[in-house]
C-alpha cells in the first residue's frame, strides 16, 4: 500500500535551484549476477513472517487437526522462462517451498514439499516478484487457495533509490519507469531504468528497453550500473548553477554548457611556472579517464561588474571501495575591457599592472563543497562515500551489501561496478518456558494471594522479529480453561509473549462439572518460528487444612517483608544496593528508574558507581519526593548504590521520619537490541512516530531527511530519503508531511507554508506550536496563526503535556498552552546554559523534560512552577532515546547509525526490600 512516505514531496527548493536540469529522460541499467539474485530472493522469503492461523483438514480423516508449524524456503531458487500464449516468454522464479504441518492431536510434524512461482515484473519505479501459483501435490490440493492467499499477500516489491549511490553527483535520480529482463542463458538479470521528470516524456525509452543485453562484468564483479553520461552532465550543470545562485556577488549570464568525453583527458594538478627567457617549466599532470567539460559565462559584482569566462573539467575514479574520487580543474579569464572601465584610468593600469588591479574582481569565489579539498587555486579534489541502495523486494532490512570497486567510461555511459555479499539469514526457532498448574502464594507486594497458576513464556531463539499467529486452549470440552487465559502484551503479537491461567481460592465451585472428570490443560501455540502443544497439567482441588494454613502464613510473611522499614537507605546506613534485574546481553540495556516519596525535604540522594564516583543526585522536594534514573550495559562502570546525604544538624530527625514513612519504588526494564538503521549522513535529530499503522523513524541528517519503517525493529526498512538542506525536522501532518527549518514551514503535498525561520516545532493534537525568532506561535491544522507569545529564548523547545519547556539565557521557562490562543508563562527555573531539551522518563506519571548542558544534564519536572528532580554528570541513557509503541530508538555516538530496542522484561512497582545484600 502506498503511503505518504513512498514519494514524499520535499520542501520547495530555493531560487538557486529553480532551473530543472534533471528533466531527462535519462537511461540507466543495473546488471546483477543471476545466481546471487536468486539467493537474494530466497533470503527475502526466509525472513517473511508467515502466519496461517487456520486449522487445516487432514486429507485422510477429514478432521481439522493440522496447523502450519512453519514455512521453509530451501536452497535452489532458479530463474526460468514461462511460455505465454499471447506474447513472449515471461521471466519468473521457481522457488522451492516446504510447509511443515503440526498434527496437534499427536503433536507430530511432517513436511509438504513443492515449488512456488513468482513472475518478475515492474510497477512504475517498483520491481516486484508477483506470486503466480504452485505445483502443490494433488492430495493437498485443498490447501491451494489458502497458500495462494498467504503467498500472494507477501509484498515483494521494492523501489530502487539511486540517491545513495549517485551522491557524488550532488543530486538525486528519481526512477520514473523500470523494466526487468535477463540474458538468454539466464546468467545476468538486468533492470533498465528511465530517470527524470515523468512529465518530460519518454522519448527513446522503448528503444532502450528492448535493446540487446550486453553484460559488462569484469573479473569477479557481481553487479554493474551503467549511468547515462547525459545525466552526469545535467547534474554538474545544476550544481554549478546552484553554486553561483547562492553567491550574492556573482551571477550567470546564461546557463552553463556541458559535454562528456570518454577519451583520456590530461589536466594540470600543479601548474607550470613561467621563467623569463625559458618559458613554462615544471608542473604536474594527471590523466582523467572520461571527463565532463563545463563552460561558464558570468559576471562578478565584487567591486563593479566584471565579466568572466570559466571552464571546468571533472573526472571520476574509484580510489578505494565505496569511495568515488572526483577531480575538478577550474580555469577562468576576466573580461579585460570590463576591468579597464571598472578600474581605470590608464595610468592606474600602467602603474599597478593588470594582475594586481583586477585581482579583486578577476575570479568568483568558487565555494569548496563538503568532503572536498582545494589543493590549488585551480584544483578541487573530493572523496564521496557511496553505496548501492538495497534491492531487497520490500524487505524491512538490508539483505545484501553492494560494494563499489571499479569505474570505467564508455561512449554514452559511466560504468560503476563491484561485488555483492549476501547477508546470512538466521531462521528463528520456537522457545517455550512453562510452569504447570500448582497451588502456591501468587502475586507481589501490591497484592499477595493463594491460587493456582500456570504460565507459558513464548519466545524465539534468536530473538528476531517473530510473531504469534494463534494461542488457543484445545481439548477443553467444558470451556473450563479458555475464559481464564490472559496473554500479555495484549496489543502486540510480537514475541516474547506470556500466557497465564490463574485460579484463586474459591473461584471454582466444588460442584463444577470439571471435578467429575478432570482433564489437563493443553495450549496450542502457533508462531512464525514454529508451533507446539504445551501440556500444563491438571487443576487439583484447592488446599485445605494444614496445607492451606501454611500457605496463608507464608503470604503474611511476604507481605510483612514488603511493608517493613528498611534499615539501609532510610536508616542509619543511608545507602541501598541496586538489585539489577539481570545483566543485559552485550548489546542490550537495562534501565532503572526510582521514585522516592514521603521523604524529608532537604535530603539528597546520589547514584554511585562501583568505583565510588557520583553519577547523579536528586534533592528531595517540599512534597517529599525525588527521582533517579540509571542504566546498565555491557561496560565495566555501572551504578551500584544509592546513597542519602542529609544535613548534619537534622540527620537524626531525618532518619526518624524517613524510617517511618519514606518509600523507594523501583522499575527496571530490560531492552534487547533488535536492529540497526544506517543513515545516509550525520544525524542532527531523530524522532519516532506512530503513523499509518507504522512506527516511523524520522532522521534529519547533514544530507537531508530520511524516513524508516521500524515497526519490525529487527528488520527496519527505508521508506524514502529527501535531499533537503536547511530542514531541522519533519513530522506527519494530515495526509502528508510537514517540514520545518531555516526556510520556515512547508506542508506536503498541498504546499501550505509559513515564511518564517523556525528553530523548533511541536504538535499538540491538531495544533502546531512553533518556536521562531520572536517567540512562540500557535497554528491550526491549515497553518493559520491563532495565538502566540513574544519571548526571548535560546532556540530549544520540548512539549510536556499541555506545557512547553523553552530554553532561555538563564535556564528554562515553562509555558501553559491550555488556552492555545493565549499561551502564558507558568514558571521559570535557573539552570546552567541549556544546549538541548529531551523528553524525560520516570517511574511514575510525573511529566518531565531533560535539559542538556555542555557537561551533564538536569531532570526537570515540567510543573507550575518547574523544579529540579535530579542532576547528572552525564546525560541519562534515555535522554538520547525516543519511544513509540513498543520500539525504542537511540542515535549512536557516531551519529551515523540508530540502534533499535524493544522491552523484553519489566519489573514495575518493586519497593525497597527489608534487607538488601551487597
Image: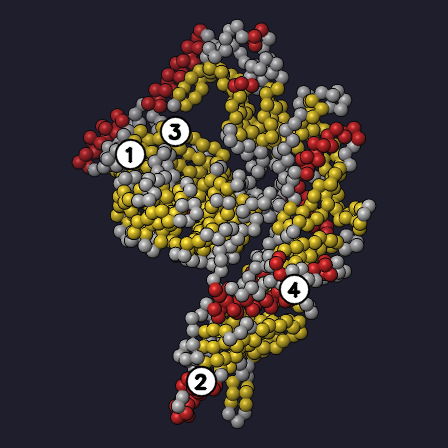
Foreground pick, 42 / 646: 42
Q: Are marks 2 and 1 in contact (CB under 8 Å)?
A: no
The quarter of the image holding the C terminus is: top left
Camera-nearest label, 1 or 4: 4
N-terminal label among 4 and 2: 4
Residue that appears at 61% across and 45% down: 395
| Residue 608 is at least partly visible in this image | no
Q: Are marks 4 and 3 in contact (CB under 8 Å)?
A: no
Find disc 4 in the rendering and name its residue. Answer: 228
Find disc 2 in the rendering and name its residue. Answer: 339
Label 4, label 3: how many angstroms apart (C-alpha)? 63 Å
Residue that appears at 44% across and 58% down: 726
N-terminal label among 3 and 1: 1
Camera-nearest label, 4 or 3: 4
Label 1, label 4: how many angstroms apart (C-alpha)? 67 Å
Camera-nearest label, 2 or 3: 2
N-terminal label among 2 and 3: 2
Label 2, label 3: how many angstroms apart (C-alpha)? 80 Å
**Mark number, residue 909:** 3
Q: Horizontal placement of 82 versus 258: left or right?
A: right
N-terminal label among 1 and 4: 4
Find disc 1 in the rendering and name its residue. Answer: 625
The quarter of the image holding the N terminus is: top right
Residue that appears at 52% across and 71% down: 380
Q: Position of residue 34 (x, y in %)?
A: 72, 52
Amino acid at each position: 500500500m502506498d503511503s505518504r512516505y513512498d514519494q514524499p514531496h520535499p520542501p520547495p527548493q530555493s531560487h538557486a535551484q529553480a532551473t530543472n536540469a534533471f528533466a531527462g529522460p535519462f537511461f540507466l541499467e543495473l546488471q546483477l549476477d543471476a545466481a546471487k539474485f536468486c539467493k537474494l530472493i530466497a533470503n527475502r522469503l526466509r525472513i517473511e513472517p508467515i502466519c496461517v492461523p487456520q486449522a487445516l483438514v487432514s486429507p485422510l480423516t477429514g478432521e481439522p487437526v493440522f496447523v502450519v508449524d512453519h514455512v521453509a524456503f530451501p536452497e535452489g531458487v532458479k530463474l526460468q522462462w514461462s511460455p505465454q500464449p499471447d506474447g513472449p516468454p515471461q521471466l519468473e522464479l521457481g522457488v522451492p517451498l516446504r510447509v511443515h504441518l503440526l498434527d496437534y492431536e499427536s503433536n507430530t510434524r511432517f513436511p509438504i514439499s513443492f515449488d512456488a512461482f513468482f513472475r518478475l515484473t515492474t510497477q512504475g519505479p517498483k520491481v516486484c516478484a508477483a506470486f503466480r501459483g504452485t505445483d502443490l501435490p494433488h492430495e493437498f490440493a485443498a490447501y491451494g487457495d489458502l497458500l495462494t492467499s498467504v503467498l500472494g499477500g507477501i509484498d515483494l516489491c521494492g523501489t530502487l533509490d539511486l540517491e545513495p549511490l549517485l551522491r557524488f553527483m550532488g543530486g538525486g535520480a528519481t526512477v520514473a519507469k523500470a523494466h526487468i529482463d535477463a540474458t538468454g542463458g539466464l546468467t545476468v538479470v538486468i533492470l533498465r531504468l528511465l530517470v527524470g521528470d515523468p512529465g518530460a516524456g519518454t522519448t527513446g525509452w522503448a528503444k532502450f528497453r528492448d535493446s540487446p543485453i550486453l553484460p559488462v562484468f569484469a573479473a569477479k564483479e557481481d553487479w554493474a550500473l551503467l549511468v547515462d553520461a547525459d545525466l552526469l552532465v545535467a547534474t554538474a550543470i545544476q550544481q554549478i548553477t546552484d553554486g553561483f545562485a547562492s553567491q550574492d556577488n556573482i551571477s550567470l549570464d546564461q546557463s552553463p554548457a556541458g559535454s562528456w568525453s570518454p577519451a583520456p583527458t590530461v589536466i594540470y594538478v600543479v601548474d607550470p611556472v613561467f621563467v623569463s627567457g625559458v618559458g613554462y617549466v615544471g608542473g604536474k599532470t594527471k590523466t582523467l579517464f572520461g571527463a565532463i567539460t563545463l563552460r561558464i559565462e558570468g559576471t562578478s559584482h565584487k567591486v563593479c561588474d566584471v565579466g568572466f569566462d570559466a571552464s571546468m573539467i571533472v573526472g571520476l575514479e574509484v580510489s578505494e571501495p565505496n569511495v568515488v574520487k572526483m577531480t575538478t580543474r577550474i580555469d577562468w579569464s576576466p573580461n579585460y575591457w570590463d576591468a579597464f572601465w571598472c578600474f581605470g584610468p590608464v595610468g592606474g593600469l600602467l602603474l599597478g599592472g593588470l594582475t594586481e588591479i583586477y585581482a579583486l574582481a578577476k575570479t568568483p569565489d568558487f565555494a569548496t563543497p563538503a568532503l572536498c579539498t582545494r589543493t590549488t587555486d585551480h584544483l578541487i579534489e573530493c572523496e564521496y562515500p557511496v553505496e548501492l541502495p538495497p534491492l531487497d523486494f520490500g524487505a524491512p532490512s538490508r539483505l545484501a551489501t553492494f560494494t563499489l570497486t571499479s569505474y570505467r567510461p564508455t561512449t554514452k555511459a559511466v560504468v560503476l561496478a563491484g561485488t555483492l555479499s549476501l547477508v546470512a539469514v538466521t531462521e528463528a526457532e520456537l522457545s517455550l518456558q512453562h510452569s504447570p498448574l500448582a497451588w502456591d502464594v501468587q502475586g507481589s507486594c501490591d497484592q499477595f494471594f493463594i491460587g493456582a497458576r500456570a504460565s507459558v513464556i513464548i519466545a524465539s531463539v534468536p530473538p528476531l522479529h517473530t510473531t504469534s499467529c494463534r494461542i488457543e486452549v484445545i481439548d477443553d470440552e467444558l470451556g473450563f480453561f479458555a475464559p481464564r487465559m490472559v496473554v500479555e502484551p495484549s496489543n502486540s503479537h510480537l514475541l516474547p509473549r506470556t500466557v497465564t491461567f490463574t485460579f484463586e481460592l474459591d473461584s471454582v465451585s466444588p460442584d463444577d462439572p470439571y471435578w467429575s472428570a478432570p482433564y489437563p490443560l493443553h495450549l496450542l501455540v502457533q508462531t512464525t518460528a514454529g508451533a507446539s502443544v504445551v501440556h500444563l497439567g491438571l487443576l487439583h482441588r484447592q488446599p485445605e487444612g494444614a496445607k492451606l494454613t501454611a500457605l496463608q502464613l507464608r503470604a503474611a510473611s511476604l507481605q510483612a517483608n514488603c511493608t517493613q522499614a528498611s534499615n539501609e537507605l532510610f536508616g542509619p546506613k543511608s545507602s541501598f544496593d541496586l538489585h539489577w534485574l539481570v545483566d543485559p546481553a552485550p548489546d542490550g540495556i537495562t534501565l532503572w528508574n526510582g521514585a522516592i516519596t514521603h521523604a524529608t525535604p532537604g535530603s539528597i540522594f546520589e547514584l554511585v558507581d562501583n568505583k565510588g564516583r557520583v553519577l547523579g543526585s536528586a534533592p528531595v522536594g517540599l512534597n517529599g519526593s525525588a527521582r533517579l534514573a540509571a542504566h546498565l550495559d555491557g561496560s565495566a562502570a555501572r551504578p551500584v548504590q544509592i546513597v542519602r546525604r542529609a544535613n548534619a544538624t537534622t540527620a537524626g530527625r531525618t532518619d526518624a521520619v524517613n524510617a517511618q514513612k519514606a518509600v523507594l519504588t523501583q522499575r527496571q526494564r530490560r531492552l534487547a537490541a533488535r536492529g540497526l538503521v544506517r543513515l545516509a549522513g550525520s544525524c542532527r535529530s531523530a524522532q519516532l512516530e506512530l503513523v499509518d499503522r507504522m512506527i516511523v523513524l524520522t532522521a534529519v541528517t547533514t544530507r537531508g531527511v530520511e524516513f524508516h519503517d521500524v515497526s519490525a525493529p529487527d528488520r527496519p526498512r527505508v521508506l524514502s530519503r529527501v535531499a533537503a538542506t536547511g530542514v531541522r525536522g519533519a513530522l506527519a501532518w494530515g495526509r502528508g508531511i510537514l517540514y520545518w527549518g531555516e526556510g520556515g514551514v512547508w506542508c506536503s503535498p498541498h504546499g501550505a507554508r509559513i515564511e518564517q525561520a523556525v528553530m523548533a516545532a511541536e504538535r499538540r493534537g491538531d495544533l502546531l506550536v512553533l518556536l521562531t525568532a520572536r517567540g512562540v506561535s500557535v497554528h491550526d491544522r491549515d497553518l493559520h496563526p491563532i495565538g502566540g507569545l513574544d519571548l526571548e529564548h535560546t532556540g530549544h523547545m520540548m512539549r510536556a503535556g499541555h506545557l512547553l519547556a523553552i530554553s532561555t539565557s538563564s535556564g528554562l521557562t515553562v509555558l501553559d498552552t491550555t488556552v492555545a490562543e493565549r499561551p502564558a508563562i507558568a514558571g521559570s527555573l535557573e539552570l546552567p546554559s541549556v544546549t538541548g531539551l529531551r523528553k524525560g522518563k520516570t517511574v511514575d506519571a510525573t511529566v518531565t523534560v531533560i535539559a542538556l548542558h555542555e557537561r551533564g544534564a538536569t531532570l526537570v519536572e515540567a510543573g507550575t512552577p518547574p523544579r529540579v528532580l535530579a542532576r547528572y554528570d552525564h546525560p541519562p541513557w534515555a535522554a538520547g532515546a525516543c519511544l513509540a509503541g513498543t520500539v525504542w530508538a537511540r542515535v549512536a555516538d557516531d551519529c551515523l547509525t540508530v540502534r533499535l530496542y524493544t522491552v523484553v522484561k519489566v519489573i514495575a512497582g518493586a519497593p525497597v526490600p527489608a534487607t538488601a545484600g551487597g
